[in-house]
Image (cartoon, coloured by chain):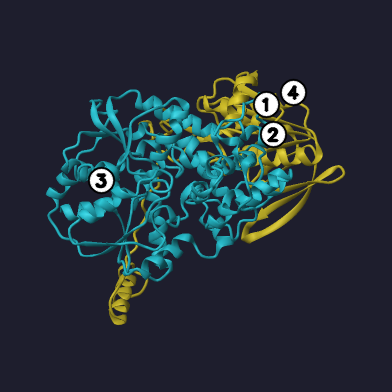
Amino acid sequence: MEETPKSNVDPEHDFVERMILEQYGERFRQCIQCGVCTGSCPNSFFMEYPPRKFIAALRANLLDRVIQSNTAWTCISCFSCSLRCPSGIKLTDVLIPNLREEILLKGKATPQEVQKALENTSRYGNPLGESARKRSDWTKQASVPVKILSQTPEPVEALWFVECYPSYNLRNIVTSQAFSRILNALKINFGILGHEESCAGDDVRLGGEKGLFEMLVERNNKALKKYKFDFILFTDPHAYNAFKNEYPKFGVQYKTVHYTKFLADRIDKLKSLFKKELAGTVTYHDPCYLGRRNGEYEAPRELLKAIPGLKLVEMPRTRENALCCGGGGGGIWLDSYIGEYSKERLSEKRIKEISHVGANILAVACPYDMSRFEDAVKVTGYEGKIAVKDIIELIDEAMQ
Amino acid sequence: MKIIVISTVVPDLVEELEILPDGKSLDKTYLRYIPNELDDHALEEALLLKERHGGEVTVTALNIREETDEMLFSALAKGADKTVKINGDFEGIDNHKRAKILRKVIEGLEFDLILTGVQTVEDVDGYGGPLLSSYLSIPYVGVVSGVSVLKETLLVKKELPGGLLSEIEVSIPCILGIQAAESPPRYLTISKLRQVMKTAKLEEFQCEKEENGKIEIKKVFKPEIAGKAEMIGGEAKDIVDRIVKILEEKGIIK
């Protein structure tokens, strides 16, 4: 598809003009109003201007109504609409972020949770408002050495980009600690950036704060340029997505790999390290930014099948049709805002699906999944019946 | 309406606080400074008033740390019309000296209203505003969470203890110590801030020497752990016995 020629416009004022400056941004004009997007959107039943209607409103010069509506902050960037759109319209990456940018620029009411997360990210390099100096504190309880490159600036094979939640969130750091044990067992020469790492910023980008995203790209690139490594290893699919698909747009290009692929490539070595049989029936939840957005469906399943003692079953909605946990695109900050409209969280719906396929372990591969689903297990009354584990944790357990 | 907003940067409590060996002040070497949250609310209230009634918003701050510049640029990017950065030697400054300096600056400006945060983490007593009001001989109302403009006066909402709210009519010019703006401070995008930092200029004011007040800090220390809780478990009888024993030990019962 050919791109429309770009024109010189004042990006402050005209939403549409600003949008078409982006790659494939003009494609919304090719919308056939088929409604596949709205039909695919897990939140469309309470979204005041779901994607199809949003584009119809744009055509009718009614952007103001969309701005006044709940649309901007009820999208959880799950990518279902974008994947299925027959016209290739960039709903998740262009339309919604531009709507949010418009709201941020005009100083319109932005949910306080989003505002706080963005301000924190700008000030501390993480949305949680934690001290940057404490970013690598989790390594102290990892029980294996984790090389922090600012302290030990040696060349490494893998630079592990840990990302914010896996560095600070008390549940997620358990996964990070398990992953460092796996890397050690595999004798991988790896290091982390520690306090020099800033949020990769994918949700900042999807949240419409483009200037902040650009600043994070600059900060991370500046830190990365100081060290020698072969590739960047990601445990967080959102950070993986940012580096794989978005950083190159700013000329920042690195070799990237998500841990599921990285470990699947070393499956024989991994198998030789398993010491214990786990018991249980496991089902796998495809994270949006590993599966739908980046097409990785096989590696996580290969890993789960390799773990001795586990039986893998699939949910009805799986792979590209997997239901989002509700945490992406700022959803992780907006639980109560979205909850006002939705009544039931997507993560709760998902837990009910899991119970129907008879799994007692839910395997995940994204830090947002962990808190979203652990909370949902409690809310839906499945506590003690369904355990939420990152694939990393299952592997680590089998290696003990 | 001409409004002056007084703001300041304060130590960011996200980082651990260290006390200097003299035991009288904080080690500020590695401390990050951030805008005082309630001053942000004061600015927001000023911008809301300007949007409603027109006028001009001037933001002023003592340049106590390099972070002051960004705070003032942020104010311009959000919609303030003018900033005055006050330069001088502010080492060990107290609220009296600060108020005297601000008086000099403010006397050179036209204004109907001065807004400032009611307190800062460094001044939870909140007497910065009252002191300035006495130096300027104009009224002060603190803990304000809403301002309406009447004909020649203001009607302000002031929080009272016990969840009560009072409405006070106050003449202008006056100073208000803001507890909360009517709506939360607006978001400022990084691109807007960067643009303003490239193009705008901060007006500067060199202040003369002023003396501190008579308050002397004897000692700065971290809160001391005063006691600890004990969870008493077991059968009702055991619990009662333990409670009785504790009360006896403390000399409360005999």
Q: Which mark is residue A179?
A: 3
Q: Are marks 2 and 1 in contact (CB under 8 Å)?
A: yes
Chain for mark 3? A
Can residue B119 be seen at all in this image of the molecule?
no
Chain for mark 1? A
Can residue B249 be seen at all in this image of the molecule?
yes
Which chain, by letter, is yellow? B
- Give the residue at mark 1: A9
Task: Determine whether the residue tagged by mark 1 lies in a helix, strand or loop.
Answer: loop
Q: Please check whether the numbered discs 2 and 1 fall on a single chain.
A: yes
- Spatial CA distance of label 4 from label 1 is 42 Å
Report the side of B80 relative to A395 (left or right): right
Amino acid on which disc 4 is placed: Gly
Disc number lying in front (3 or 2)? 2
Report the side of A17 relative to A148 (left or right): right
Chain for mark 2? A
Q: Quadrant of the C terminus of chain B?
A: bottom left
- Give the residue at mark 2: A14
Chain for mark 4? B
The image quadrant of residue B117 is: top right
View extreme (bottom): residue: B237
